[in-house]
Amino acid sequence: MTIPFICIHHSDLMWRHSYDEYDNIRYRQLKHLLAMSRKHKTFKFGIEQSEILRKYIQQAPEDKEYITDMIKSGRIEPSGGLCIQDVNMVCGESIIMAHILGREFYKSTFGFEPVVACLTDAFGMCGQIPQILTKCGYKYLIPGRLPNRDIKSLPFPYDGVFRWFGLDGSAIVVTSREGRFTNHGFPISNSRILQKNSTRLANDLRRIQKDTVNSLVIYSTEEDLIEEDLLWVMDAVNREGQRKFEFQTAEEYFSSSDIALSPRIYGEFNPTFSGCYTTRIGVKQLLRKAENRLFEEELMDVIKKSTPRDFGPAWYELILSGFHDALCGCHTDEANHQLLEKLNFVLNAAAPDVPKKNAKQFNVFNFNAFSGIQLASSSFPPSGIPCQKDGNQYCFEFSGTPYSAETFLVAQDDENSNSIPCVPCFKTAYFTADFTDGHTLIRNRVGDNVFGNDFGEVMIRADFGSMWNENHSCAELWRGRNFAEEKLTECTEGKIFFKAVLEGRFLDFPATCGNTGSHWPGFGSLAFRKEYIFPKNADYFTMRLTLGWKGFNTKIAVKYPLKIDVYDSHPLYSVPFGAVERKPYFEVPYEFRNTSSFLAMDMDYETAKGDWPALSWVNYSDSGKGLSVANTGTPGHQLKCGDIMVSLLRSGTMTCDGGLVPPVGSYDNGTHVFDFAFRAHSPREMYKAIQLGDVLNHPVRVVAELPKSKGSAIVCADENIAMSAVRPVDGGILVRAYETLGRHTETSFKGGLLKGNLLMNAGMDGKILDRADVDNIHFAPFEIKTFIIKRRSKM
């Protein structure tokens, strides 16, 4: 039995260098690989991401024909999608689009459709990856990092294959990235015996020969060349009478594996590198904003009368912005500058049309699936309904149906829209609030109270870690209100909402950790401002938290304490295309030890320090009550011991991977703004958490053009079904929806887009399969479905 040997460059699109610099590095690498393939007819190599070949063909179009021939002969194996994203922090639709666009490039350029997906080095993997990949057309996966799983303890040699089952039950065949991974690019130092690269490689291969299983050997470099010495080293080892190494493709390896007898693994591979959930937080916020904007403007192009725009270039830049070493924030300041340019390009490409300043009427559109009372805002005062001015915006209540519009005349004056001072104790239809003496006491009026005292406490702690990993080496865990001053500076009331503003700062304090500075070495100053908005008739409220930060070696968070039964609690986190319950795993007090879980291996705690990644919302409930908290781009959360903790900023200084010194820009000094929304409800109403995330991220806003038809454009009868895309495509409208809470659901769709048209089942890529029954659609738990709305006349 031969041993399959795969050559591949792990090609970062940005990290220690900028996007442009890495383009040149990959050009040099691919030129060298092609030269090796011309010289050595048995040599094969793989490509991780379509962006690598796309860029190279732009630089060297003369090689396209040769590359095409090599792909057809099986000596070059393209794999993966457009790029390797951080699949915990981008939305599910971005993951799908990355793989669909990557596959489209491979097929249109080379006539090749890959069956091997590649997420090498991705920092953990969410539980919907198997469903996404299999529905995109992949059979196999070379995975990202595999944290919180003791792969070596599985009932097979750990470098074999296993079947990974996702949240919906879909399965994909995976090889252990941690199994046999060798390279020629990093000389080993700080060891007892020093070896030349070729000697070390030969010894690695000899050790692998002793295994009796069908293991996959991946030979990889990052920025270096794959040395031609590799071939004579393989020849030398093969002459020693043991099993022979042979260049293969990943598909050849997988297809020869005994998949039927391989072990099963369920769920997700998280957490790891939890510091990445917070480093350069502005990148994560801007990417969330860009994803939200693309969803909204693609929807507008479907329902408005004017010609749809081409968002292809915007999707391309958005996906590159979600590359794992980009979105995690662990890169140079120059690379970060290019990343921000890409995200701003997306926002400009998807800029919404707005009414003219002298308009006599304006339209607002509900971009979310919530049909209850929510706040809308406009730069125009609406006529005939109460409104309240807040800055340069006029706020008013909106209670229209999901994905629908309403038109308002512009009022002649705004005399009755001003706010007036009020006492710091007030109540709305759903909440009471007391901000006396700068303390925040909130109570829900419907059901048992869920709010703890000092709600929204800003917290700090020392963090001497790298951009990836946290390092809290001081004895004290967190410092909060007792080390700060805070006071109420504004409390006002209008026709629509109450507003309370608190301002504060952390006081200087002798260093109890380290030998210099205030609090600890690196802490400079932290000021904060909290703006609470309590709508009088809506069942949620919001908080805008502004931080003014200077310093480093610090992590900053905000804490929302609850009154729930911790021993009967359920911490729920939104993830791409779903939600998962996760127990706390780090710094859990002894009395709550039974509510926690252990990560699989001790080494997991080197890279994870308490945070789990979440998308737009979390919910923390016991069997009777709970609270949902929505965010606009702050992934790091800890739900433990009755508190919801959201990580806001961190600024480590430790030199780490690749010798990368954290640049000054990664300290995130300056002003940062965070928006949150809160909704108290029963755990039996978990759909309200989904709605809250939708309301905060896709609010009702002004649009320039009315939809072609009145009422909802499209709406699902069940509130646990969410939309990830409604976009124009050739011959119709693509609609992507998914089940969010793990329930079998029989549902239906209705709305203006369906009138006179047909709803067709489709693949992830939009290819029509058969006709759907619009009144009887079944979603399995966490299932993602794609539909095409097609005009009857064109059938």
Image (spheres, rainbow, N blue to C red):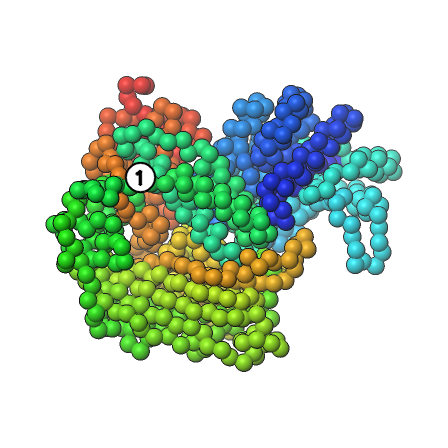
Q: Amino acid at mark 1?
A: Asp
Residue 350 screen position, x and y as percent: 38, 39
Residue 712 screen position, x and y as percent: 24, 38
Q: Residue at x 33, y 40 (%)?
A: 352
User: Which residue sits furthest front?
Assistant: 358
Kindly state the secondary structure of the residue where label 1 is placed: loop
The answer to which quarter of the image holds residue 535 is bottom left
Q: Can residue 359 be seen?
A: yes
Is 627 situated above or below 350?
A: below
Quadrant assignment for the N terminus: top right
Is 723 situated above or below 278?
A: above
Q: Residue at x 36, y 36 (%)?
A: 298
Q: Can residue 642 be seen?
A: no
**Nearer to the camera, 781 or 202:** 202
**Nearer to the camera, 555 or 748:** 555
**Nearer to the camera, 669 or 621:** 669
Left or right position of 150 against 410: right
Quadrant assignment for the C terminus: top left
Q: Residue at x 40, y 77 (%)?
A: 485
The answer to which quarter of the image holds residue 653 is bottom right
Left or right position of 576 against 727: right
Mark 1 closeness class: few <14, some 14–19, many ≥20 residues within 10 Å: few
Residue 209 screen position, x and y as percent: 79, 42
**Nearer to the camera, 476 or 563:** 476
Residue 244 screen position, x and y as percent: 80, 35
Residue that label 1 marks: 353
